[in-house]
Image (cartoon, helix red, strand yellow):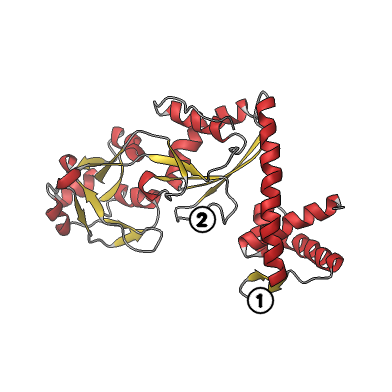
Amino acid sequence: MVARSDLAELSVFLAIVRQGSFARAAIELGVTTSALSHAMRKLETRFGVRLLNRTSRAVVPTHAGRELALRLSEGFQTISDALSALDVHRDAPVGRLRLNVPKDAQRLLIGPVLPDFVRRYPQVHLDVTVDDRPVDIVAQGFDAGIRYGGAVPRDMIAVPLTPPLRWVVIGAPAYLERRGRPRTPEELHLHACVQMRIGDNSAFAWELGDGDAMVRVDVPGPFCVNETDGAVDAAMRGVGLAYCLEWRVADEIRAGALEVVMADWSSIGPPLALYYPSRRQTPPGLRQLTDLVRVSKGLPPRSGPQA
């Protein structure tokens, strides 16, 4: 018979294996690393088997630990599915929903609907990690993620959250008066451009135009950054031209702080999409959050299984 304390400590063990780190597991579980160490010492002492090998750089399971983690993952998933099945008997979802999203998605999608979601579904604890790097949401213990449609892994279920998105080149009026306005992709090589570094640390080539007319330009520039806010801020300060979602800078354009240049070379890209692994039961609150975001962006609610 498994005691309640055993289940709690086994859950701790799984989190450490999943994260490969006591520190990251502590953040996920909302406890201290010393509490995790204490729980693991108790677990290994009780069972008389070493489950983890600790080094200065990482924590890895022993052979026995790997076998236990595999079986526990299957067992905890069965428990999770059973509990999720109870949602059909509730008026509202209950539980924890863990998401991994890029910064643009947090700012443009989650933030605007968050007050309504919290008010409507107070029994859902929404746990959002903002990360522009691509991650394995299953391995990292997330229920779902948001990425641009073209970056969603093929083995995931994907739900568009926005219409197709328009990407534009922007610049501050002061910069454009000083350096002029480019009219063709070739003229970008005569300008200072704010480069964007993507998840694999390579510089993102600006995609200009659509269809067969699309060109990708490796732009020159004095500054490179790995997130949109930094690129937009640099453009507003006159450092150079930047490339981003038109939606992201709509307020700055209306205020006259930024201008779209080369409008004929704007590009329409895939929508932002929510994605999650195929399961019999979706995590609590996921469908409700998806519907709120879709409706806020002019899309119909998604029909499908209840979360």
The residue pinned by badge 2 equals 136
Crowding near the residue tagged with mark 1, few <14, some 14–19, many ≥20 C-alpha atoms within 10 Å: few
Q: Is residue 207 left or right of residue 252?
A: left
User: Residue flagged by tag 2: what amino acid is it?
Assistant: Asp
Q: Can you say whether 242 is above or below 291 in the image?
A: below
Q: Quadrant of the C terminus?
A: top right
User: Residue flagged by tag 1: what amino acid is it?
Assistant: Thr
**Residue drawn at (17%, 51%), measured in percent from left and top?**
178
Dot 2 falls on a residue whose secondary structure is loop
**Residue drawn at (21%, 42%), measured in percent from left and top?**
266
The residue pinned by badge 1 equals 55
What whole-number distance in Å separates the C-alpha atoms at marks 1 and 2?
Answer: 23 Å
Quadrant of the image occupied by residue 25: bottom right
In the image shown, does 233 or 300 lie closer to the viewer?
A: 300
Q: From this viewpoint, is residue 142 visible?
A: yes
Dot 1 falls on a residue whose secondary structure is loop
**Residue drawn at (71%, 56%), measured in percent from left and top?**
72
Q: Is residue 7 left or right of residue 127?
A: right
Q: From this viewpoint, is residue 62 visible?
A: no
